[in-house]
Amino acid sequence: MPPIDLPRLAVVPDVRLVAVDMDGSLLDDAKRIDPSFWPLLDTLVARGVTVCPASGRQYATLRRQMGRDDLVYVAENGAHVVRDGAALAVHGLEARVARDVVRRVRRLTTAGADLGVVLCGLRSAYVERTDAPFLAQCEPYYALLEQVPDLTAVEDTVLKVAVYDFGPADTGAGPALTRFGGVARVLVSGEHWVDVMSPDADKGHALRDVQRALGVGPDQTVAFGDYFNDIGMLEAAHWSFAMDNAHPDVRARARFVAPSNNDNGVVRTLRALLRLG
């Protein structure tokens, strides 16, 4: 499926909501946002379009990255939705399940797997593994990150358990954690990350929460994504765009293809779709 020639659309769609994945979509491979995004964001907000960064990242991280409260944030892969600085939806993971996941990863590590765990809570994220290589993988995603001696003793609303695999997650931690599939949603959310979440936590469910709150329909919604954790969100939007760099399974589930994250695909597509020049 080649990138769509958007300027040929006969009618400018009535877009009211734009949901955009961060890593692999809005962010280039160096984790940068193209400077042209910021004036576009101002234009969209001024036109009454709600912009919704949607990510596996923590809300505090997204808020720091975007620098404004007039957006709706879908954080923790849909487990935490924030509007106007307040929670619109929280889909927490049962504490017992979270503890069992931590213990399972500990056993896998003892057996030789190179894994680290982030317990993602409503107040903060928490780690008990504290070596520099692991923390370097965590810090870009968690602006609030506490080191604790025992993750199973943390008292916080658990949004998800994120497991970092220094090898390929889809052949390592992902299959090793599938046993929790009956009580949780186990999602390979990146090349090295696996998220264990509430069965109700999903970017698609979160985007529908936002649509209901705003009175916006799928035909008024644009969504961009590149990986498995974006599929539900793409399916909730009529104007669904897989990035040109997206996983083939994600491309197959989207209606359209946007230029890659390294080619400023989100900005270029929105400007063409809405004829903003």
Image: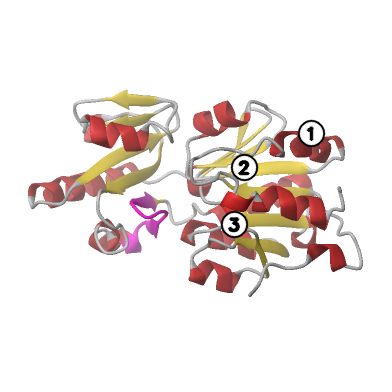
Residue 206 visible at all: no
Residue at the image position 79 percent from the left and 33 percent from the top = 42
Q: Which of 263 and 143 lies nearest the eye of the viewer?
A: 263
Q: Nearer the viewer, mark 1 or mark 2?
A: 1
| Residue 115, position as x, y percentages in the image | 22, 46
Identify the image quadrant of the N terminus.
bottom right
Residue at the image position 19 percent from the left and 26 percent from the top = 149
Magenta region: which residues? Answer: 181-196
Q: Which of 50 and 41 lies nearest the eye of the viewer?
A: 41
Question: As shown in the figure, which amino acid type bears the numbered disc 2?
Answer: Pro
Relative to 201, residue 81 above or below: above
| Residue 110, position as x, y percentages in the image | 8, 47
Tag 2 residue: 53
Tag 3 residue: 260
Element on which disc 3 rests: loop
Question: As shown in the figure, which amino acid type bears the numbered disc 3?
Answer: Ser
User: In the image, is 207 to the left or to the right of 45?
Assistant: left
Assess whether residue 228 is covered by the magenta stretch. Answer: no
Residue at the image position 80 percent from the left and 43 percent from the top = 49
Q: Residue furthest left?
A: 111
